[in-house]
Amino acid sequence: MIRVSKVSKRFKVVSAVQKADLHVQKGDIMGLLGPDGAGKTTLLRMICGLITPDEGEILLMGKPLEQLDKYRDELGYMPQRFSLYGDLTVMENIFFFGSMYRLDRSVIKQRADEILDITNLIPFKNRLADQLSGGMKQKLSLTCALITRPSLLILDEPTYGVDPESRKEFWKILYDLNRSGMTLLITTPYMDEAELCTKVAFISEGKIRLVSSPADLKKSFSYPVMQINLKTRRPINLHDLPGILDVSYMGSKVHVIVRDREQGHTEIQNYLLRNRIADATIQEVLPTMEDIFVGLAEGGAERWNMP
């Protein structure tokens, strides 16, 4: 569905994307992950034809971007920020967006009713967009992106700043769309959402470092991960202990990546004893996507012996 080959984009002295290669197959839910400023949005905007690459080639559904106007209704795009009209109602926004694709009003209404039913927005059809909650605004943006019934949907951090319950509802909708045959490319800052993707691509400093499934990434992680369960949120500092490669703080839990299982466990246990931190337990756990993301962002795949 999407093939990006050696694509680069520069803004004055900044290389936003550097010789990126990415292949999204039909039926994928591809998550594009990376720290702020890594080049995620720039790459998505190039794929959508909103920015022209300086070099390289992008094919959508086997066709070059130069022909995008001929099959634009096959592509749905939901930008990072809510970009519809706050002083128009839900239906007025949908009619406006559908008219840009030269859809008949009757077709827009029929499709809107179908999509609004899926997104649970039918009771709010006549409400001004500015009066919607953050989660409902995102659902309205999604409705507009789906009005042409695209086979490929591209979403740029669609749930950023949305409450957890609305995020769950939104992802249920995405899963239903994927099961119906739609291919998805999505950026997200939430690692629990990355777990829901069939594949993830990690980008940093404009370069795509690796592409894999979440399950394979976890299997290929070479070092043990120890989890400390604390009864209180007392701050602890484990970074300087021998054999500690990385530490992530998650409220009352701390994930510690260690070079050696036994040595790491002993070093952590001795630290807790020295600092009189009682009622803490240590257990080995599987790495989370958060562990992997932090590790890749800080040291790259080579540091963690990942393919």
Image: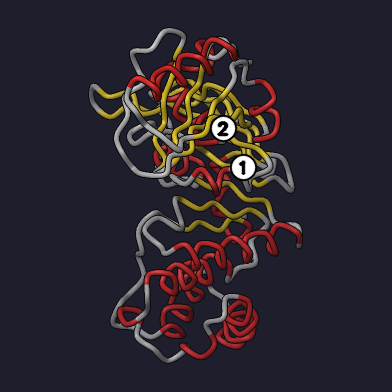
Q: Which residue is mark 2?
A: 201
* Rendered position, 183 above or below 179: above
* Rendered position, 118 above or below 67: below
Q: Amino acid at mark 1?
A: Met
Q: Earlier in the sequence, mark 1 or mark 2?
A: 1
* Rendered position, 288 above or below 72: above
Spatial separation of the CA atoms under disc 1 and disc 2:
7 Å
**Residue that appears at 42% across and 79% down:** 93
Q: Quadrant where the C terminus lies?
A: top right
Percent coordinates x, y for residue 249 in the rendering: 39, 35
Percent coordinates x, y for residue 124 in the rendering: 46, 88
**Residue that appears at 58% across and 67% down:** 146
The disc placed on residue 303 is: none
For the residue carrying disc 2, how many other residues have a C-alpha within 10 Å: few (<14), some (14-19), or many (20+)?
Answer: many
Q: Are marks 1 and 2 in contact (CB under 8 Å)?
A: yes
Judged from the image, the secondary structure of the residue bearing numbered disc 2 is strand
Judged left or right of residue 156, residue 68 is right
**Residue that appears at 42% across and 64% down:** 163
Judged from the image, the secondary structure of the residue bearing numbered disc 1 is strand
For the residue carrying disc 1, how many other residues have a C-alpha within 10 Å: few (<14), some (14-19), or many (20+)?
Answer: many
User: Is residue 55 shown to the viewer in this render?
Assistant: no
The disc placed on residue 30 is: 1
Of residues 288 and 101, the one drawn nearer to the viewer in this rendering? 288
Q: Amino acid at mark 2?
A: Ala
Percent coordinates x, y for residue 291 in the rendering: 50, 30
Percent coordinates x, y for residue 145 in the rendering: 53, 65
